[in-house]
Every structure is written in structure tokens, then in C-alpha cells.
Image (spheres, helix red, strand yellow):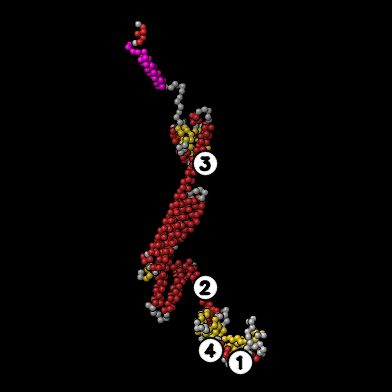
């Protein structure tokens, strides 16, 4: 029947047949698509050219797709990228601009050519863009890229410089602290081990004692400590100023302020090196001689060496004078011989030392000059009572420099002869002058009282003077000044005055309240 024939077709069901037909349709469509893709393009169309980016530090500036003058687009893009890298070396104010050439336009950054553009490059952009418009657009992009890169480089450089400044400052601070620690340790070691620093000897002669050597070492350590710290700070300051354009000019000034004089000093020292060696040898010889004199007079002071003309107590002052004279004479006389010039620094130093010595000795020389008349004129005799230089006493010795007196209590007074120029010298004789004041009745006649007082002093004094000091209702005050005979004092004079007024019946008064 008809129904049974529709259920089977070669033993297959209708659903299976439809699946086979669908698979065949899809396979045919796939073959048609593959053949369409494999067909070559029509002769009337052309494939789009490939473009290559011109990069400036990973930033795309513009693209090139057309070859030129035998150079591919890729090569032109690479050359333009390298040219942009080189353009950073141009001055900061250099900008991008274009220059026309026959059939081409060259884009410059400053004096650096970046890329040469032709009509093919403008046509590759598409549209009706002309070569000049395209070149101007490329120049604008190049200028923006260069400016952005310069700004980025400047910011990066400032950040790096500031970071380097902070890091170098920390390093300089640590180095300064380390130098201070080392100097402190060195000084502490010197103080803790004084026996480890020996004396400075030249052969068997001790030029400098250990104490002096330790002092010199301490001074050298202190100077080295400060010089090293100053050097570190100075170098860091120069480095810090050189990191920024605003302070770079001060770097040259600061370097010239210290380095130029230092280099000039080193140059002069190098030129004067032979003279310095000779001077050093002469100084060492002088030091040895001075040390020998010190040891010699030290032995005299200790009694180890005996000299008839020099007592032991004068050995120390004599040593000082002899050593000072050796140094001054060596500077004055040996300096012209060593330097070969009478107008050298050493000669001037010697003359300055002589001038200073002369100024220092002016009071002593003036005292000696003032003492010449007193010594050779023999106006002051040993044992006389005198008033010299404002002091009173018995003359015990007269020298060129001073007058030696003995006061009332037996103390020794040394009056410089120079004081005689300001104070008069009064020679009193064999005894000092004494003064006695007495008050008598106001009703007594002054002439009678004066006669009695003068008579009382004649018998007991060599020289006398009677003065009426005051007269009022309470009494008359008299002063008797005299030089008692035979070394008697004020008590003998007062006893003679009291006896005389009692004999004459002169009544005593009383001192007025006002006096």
C-alpha cells in the first residue's frame, strides 16, 4: 500500500534522511565559502599599505607607511625614532619646525632633522590632505612629544637630584659623626696610654719631652678632626649646589673661594721646597742647641754642674735669657744666610722680635737710665732715712734699677729708680722725721708757746719745725715735726715737749670738736 511505502526508503526512516540532507547542505556551503576566500582579489582593488609607528620613549608620535629614496617605511620609522632621541641633546628652547626642499618637506627639532616627508606620505593618510598640511601636523606632534619628554626628564632629574641630595647629606652626616668618634677614641687612647708616646730624641739628645710630644699630638688630633669635618661638609656643599641649575653658579664661586688659594699655596710651597728643607734643618739644629742650653743650666740649678760665676738660684733666669737670645739672634742673622735675601719673611720676623723685645725692655732701660745719677752721684748713702718713690725707709742698697729700703718694721722695700721721675726724693738723714701734735690753752700767747716748743726740740733734734694748725676757744693746736738725734723716736720728742711746757707753766687745752 502507499502508506507503507512512505514509512521506509531503502530501509531508513524519514528523520534520518532529513539529517543526511542537512549535513550535505552545510558541507556545500563550507566548500563555497572556502573557495570564495581562496579567490584572488579583483584587479580593480589594492590592499592597504602597512604603517610603522615612530616612537619616542614608548610613545607613538606619528606613523609612516610609504617608502622613500630606497628606504622602507620601517627603516624610515626607526631612523625618525633615533632622530627624536638625539633631538633631546639640542638646547632647551629648540622646537620643531619644517623646512621645504624640492619635492619634499623636512621636519627639524632645533638643528636635528627628524624625518623627510613626501607626497606619498600625505597620500597615505587619505583624503585630500596636502603635503604642507601633513608636515605641519607631524611637526606639531613632534613638538608636543619633545616638550612632554623634556618636562618628564626635567621632573625626573629634579626628583633624582633631590633624592641624591638627601642621600649624600645622610652619608656626609654619618662620615662627620664617624670622624668625630675616631678623633674622640684617639684622644682617649692618648690620655689612657701616656707611656706609649715617647720623647722626641735626636740621637742621644732629648729634643722634646714626652709631655710636650703628647701635647703636640693632642693639638694635631684636634686640628685633623676639624679639618676632616670641614672638608667633608665643604665637598658635600659643592656637590649639593651642583645638582640644581639655579645654584650651579654658586658652585664655581665656592670652589674658587677655597681651591684657588689652596692651589696657589701648594704651588708656592712646591717652589720653595728646597728653601723649606734648609730652613727645617736649621730649625732642628737651633732646637737641639736650645735644648742643650736648657739641660746645661738645669744641671747648674740642680747642683750637678758648678760654675763659679753663676750661682744656682740664677741658673733658671739665665737659661731663659740665653735661649731667648739664641732664638732672636738666629732669626736675625741666620735668616738672610738661609734665604739669600735680607728682606725675607724670617728677617722681618727677626726684626719684629727685636722691636717687641725693645718695647718690652723699655721700662727696665728707663729705670737703668734714671738710676745712673743716683748710683754715680752718691746722693743716697747706706743707712740714711729717705723718702723715695713715695716710700719711707732706711737705705740698704742702691742699684741701677732700684733702691732697696727697710721700713719701720724691718721689711724690705724695692723702689724702681723710674719712680723718682714722678715722686721727689727726700733725704731725712740718720733718723726718720717724726711729728707730735699738742693742744695748749687758748689764753696762752702763741709767740711764747712757739718759743718754748722750738727750745724743747733743739736739745733733742737735728732739724725741727713748729706749726700752728688752729686757734679757737677750746685751745691752740700745734704740730712739731723734727728729726730726733741718736735714732730716738717720737716718744723722746713728746717727752721733751711735755717737760718744756710744764716748766714754763703753759696750760694744756682740749681739741675742738670740729677738728
* Upstream in sequence: badge 4 or badge 1: 4
Disc number lying in front (4 or 1): 1
The answer to which quarter of the image holds residue 449 is: bottom right
**Which stretch is magenta?**
10-39
Disc number lying in front (2 or 1): 1
Residue, disc 3:
94
Q: How far apart are marks 4 and 2 (CA)?
A: 45 Å
Indicate the position of residue 377 as horizontal and vertical percent values: 54, 85
Disc number lying in front (3 or 2): 2
Residue at the spot x=53%, y=30% of the render? 130
- Mark 3 secondary-structure assignment: loop
Disc number lying in front (4 or 3): 4
Q: Reply above or below: 384 against 221.
A: below
* Upstream in sequence: badge 3 or badge 1: 3
Residue 119 visible, this angle: no
* Upstream in sequence: badge 4 or badge 2: 2
Q: Distance between the residues labelled 3 and 2?
A: 73 Å
Residue, disc 4:
487
- The circle drawn on residue 359 is 2
Mark 3 touches mark 1? (CB < 8 Å): no
Residue 211 visible, this angle: yes
- The circle drawn on residue 502 is 1
Amino acid at each position: 500500500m502507499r502508506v507503507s511505502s512512505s514509512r521506509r526508503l531503502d530501509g531508513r526512516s524519514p528523520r534520518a534522511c532529513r539529517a543526511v540532507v542537512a549535513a550535505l547542505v552545510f558541507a556545500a556551503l563550507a566548500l563555497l565559502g572556502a573557495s570564495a576566500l581562496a579567490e584572488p582579489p579583483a584587479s580593480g582593488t589594492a590592499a592597504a599599505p602597512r604603517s610603522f609607528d615612530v616612537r619616542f620613549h614608548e610613545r607613538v608620535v606619528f606613523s609612516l607607511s610609504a617608502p622613500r629614496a630606497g628606504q622602507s617605511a620601517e627603516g624610515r620609522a626607526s631612523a625618525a625614532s633615533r632622530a627624536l632621541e638625539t633631538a633631546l641633546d639640542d638646547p632647551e628652547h629648540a622646537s620643531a619646525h619644517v623646512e621645504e626642499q624640492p619635492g619634499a618637506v623636512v621636519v627639524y627639532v632645533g638643528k636635528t632633522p627628524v624625518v623627510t616627508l613626501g607626497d606619498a606620505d600625505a597620500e597615505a593618510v587619505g583624503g585630500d590632505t596636502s603635503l604642507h598640511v601633513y608636515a605641519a601636523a607631524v611637526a606639531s606632534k613632534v613638538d608636543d612629544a619633545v616638550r612632554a619628554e623634556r618636562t618628564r626628564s626635567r621632573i625626573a632629574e629634579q626628583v633624582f637630584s633631590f633624592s641624591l641630595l638627601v642621600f649624600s647629606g645622610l652619608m656626609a652626616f654619618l662620615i662627620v659623626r664617624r670622624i668625630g668618634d675616631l678623633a674622640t677614641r684617639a684622644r682617649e687612647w692618648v690620655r689612657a696610654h701616656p707611656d706609649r708616646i715617647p720623647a722626641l730624641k735626636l740621637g742621644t739628645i732629648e729634643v722634646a719631652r714626652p709631655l710636650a710630644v703628647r701635647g703636640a699630638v693632642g693639638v694635631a688630633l684636634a686640628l685633623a678632626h676639624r679639618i676632616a669635618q670641614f672638608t667633608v661638609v665643604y665637598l658635600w656643599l659643592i656637590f649639593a649646589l651642583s645638582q640644581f641649575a639655579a645654584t650651579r653658579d654658586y658652585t664655581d664661586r665656592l670652589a674658587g673661594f677655597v681651591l684657588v688659594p689652596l692651589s696657589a699655596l701648594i704651588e708656592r710651597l712646591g717652589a720653595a721646597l728646597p728653601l723649606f728643607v734648609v730652613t727645617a734643618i736649621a730649625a732642628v739644629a737651633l732646637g737641639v742647641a736650645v735644648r742643650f742650653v736648657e739641660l746645661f743650666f738645669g744641671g747648674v740649678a740642680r747642683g750637678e754642674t758648678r760654675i763659679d760665676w753663676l750661682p744656682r738660684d740664677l741658673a733658671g733666669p739665665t737659661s731663659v735669657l740665653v735661649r731667648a737670645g739664641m732664638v732672636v739672634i738666629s732669626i736675625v742673622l741666620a735668616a738672610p744666610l738661609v734665604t739669600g735675601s735680607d728682606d725675607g719673611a724670617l728677617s722681618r720676623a727677626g726684626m719684629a722680635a727685636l722691636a717687641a723685645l725693645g718695647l718690652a725692655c723699655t721700662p727696665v732701660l728707663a729705670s737703668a737710665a734714671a738710676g745712673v745719677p743716683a748710683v754715680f752721684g752718691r746722693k743716697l748713702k747706706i743707712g740714711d732715712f729717705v723718702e723715695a718713690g713715695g716710700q719711707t725707709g732706711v737705705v740698704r742698697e742702691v742699684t741701677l734699677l732700684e733702691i732697696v729700703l727697710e721700713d719701720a718694721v724691718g721689711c724690705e722695700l724695692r723702689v724702681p729708680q723710674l719712680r723718682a721721675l714722678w715722686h721727689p726724693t727726700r733725704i731725712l738723714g740718720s733718723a726718720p722725721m717724726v711729728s707730735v701734735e699738742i693742744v695748749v690753752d687758748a689764753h696762752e700767747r702763741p709767740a711764747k708757746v712757739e718759743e718754748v716748743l722750738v727750745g724743747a726740740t733743739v736739745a733733742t733734734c737735728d732739724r725741727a719745725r713748729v706749726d700752728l694748725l688752729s686757734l679757737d676757744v677750746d685751745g691752740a693746736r700745734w704740730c712739731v715735726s723734727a728729726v730726733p738725734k741718736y735714732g730716738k723716736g717720737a716718744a723722746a720728742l713728746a717727752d721733751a715737749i711735755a717737760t718744756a711746757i710744764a716748766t714754763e707753766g703753759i696750760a694744756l687745752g682740749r681739741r675742738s670738736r670740729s677738728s
